[in-house]
Amino acid sequence: MSDYKAILEEEFEVLESIFPDELEKLSETSVSIRIEPEEQSISDPITIQLIVDYPETYPDVIPSMSLQEIEGEGELREGEEDVVLDNLREIAEESIGMAMTFTIASAAKEALALLIVERARKEKEEDDRRTREYEEAEAARTRGTPLTRDLFDKWRKSFTAEIRAKREKEEQDRVKALNPKEREEWRKRKERPTGRQLFESSSALATSDEGLYEEGVEEVDMRKYTREQREEERRKEEEEEERRRRGLVNDGDSDNE
């Protein structure tokens, strides 16, 4: 027991000379050392207290170690404390049988420096990921959707329905503005069958053109006449009709001739 106390007293004396401002003796068997990395992060600084508690079998076993955050000087993120302590225990195992607190404290500084580097790496990866997602979203937005036959047919049906609905509404609004008489006339015109409906309902009109000609009647090919000739024929017919109307020509004269 006396050897254990002598070992600790000697080690504490050395530690006080190395860490005059950082070391705090918590008890006869434990100390706290303020640990700050050699290169501190300006945007994300971190400083901690390393708590070391020495068992009676020290230095034949490694001391108990824990980390304590310092208010206002950064916080350890999830999982970081375990990473640092695992690293310190591994270093301490290599120094069993010797005073090892200084070695542990030095390793803690290096571990914090690695934490800062790892944080910066993860933040850069996250920034790159967000940038990549934004660029991909922008590219997809500006590229648009490739046009296919199905998409075009779908758009055409939607567009046609939209135009039809718009026209029907405009027609309804126009009818509402009519007076009763005008509205009644509009209704009658609306109910009147269209030319297409008449054509489709008429068996005579629905037959082929051959049925419209009597057998033996010669069809007149108007393509044989020039425009001037057609105009001349039309003019003669109009003059003949005008003379007949005035009584200058009668059917008898035509027959006698």
Image: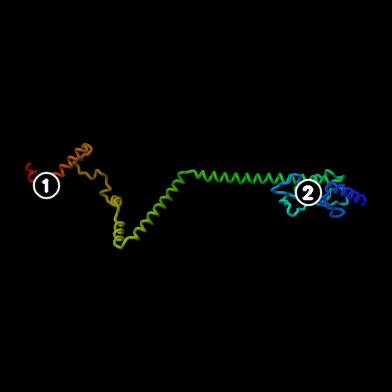
Going 88% across and 51% down the picture, which residue do you hit? 56
Residues packed near mark 2 inside 10 Å, few (<14), some (14 to 19) or many (20 plus): many
Residues packed near mark 1 inside 10 Å, few (<14), some (14 to 19) or many (20 plus): few
Distance between mark 1 and mark 2 Cα atoms: 128 Å
Residue 9 colored in magenta in the image: no
Residue 246 colored in magenta in the image: yes
Residue 64 percent location from the top left of the image:
82, 51
Question: What stretch of residues is rendered in magenta?
Answer: 243-247
Element marked by disc 2:
strand
The count of marks equals 2
Residue 128 percent location from the top left of the image:
63, 44
Query: 236 above or below 52?
Result: above
Q: Mark 1 vs mark 2: which is more N-terminal? A: 2
The residue under label 2 is which amino acid type?
Ile
The residue under label 1 is which amino acid type?
Arg
Q: Which residue is mark 2?
A: 35
Query: 161 above or below 147?
Result: below
User: In the depicted view, which residue is nearer to us: 198 or 22?
Assistant: 22
Asked if disc 1 and disc 2 are in contact, CB closer than 8 Å, the reply is no
In the drawing, what numbered circle is on residue 244? Answer: 1
Q: Quadrant of the C terminus?
A: top left
Display colour scheme? rainbow
Residue furthest right in the image = 2
Residue 61 percent location from the top left of the image:
85, 48
Residue furthest bottom in the image = 180
Going 20% across and 44% down the picture, which residue do you hit? 214
Residue furthest left in the image = 256
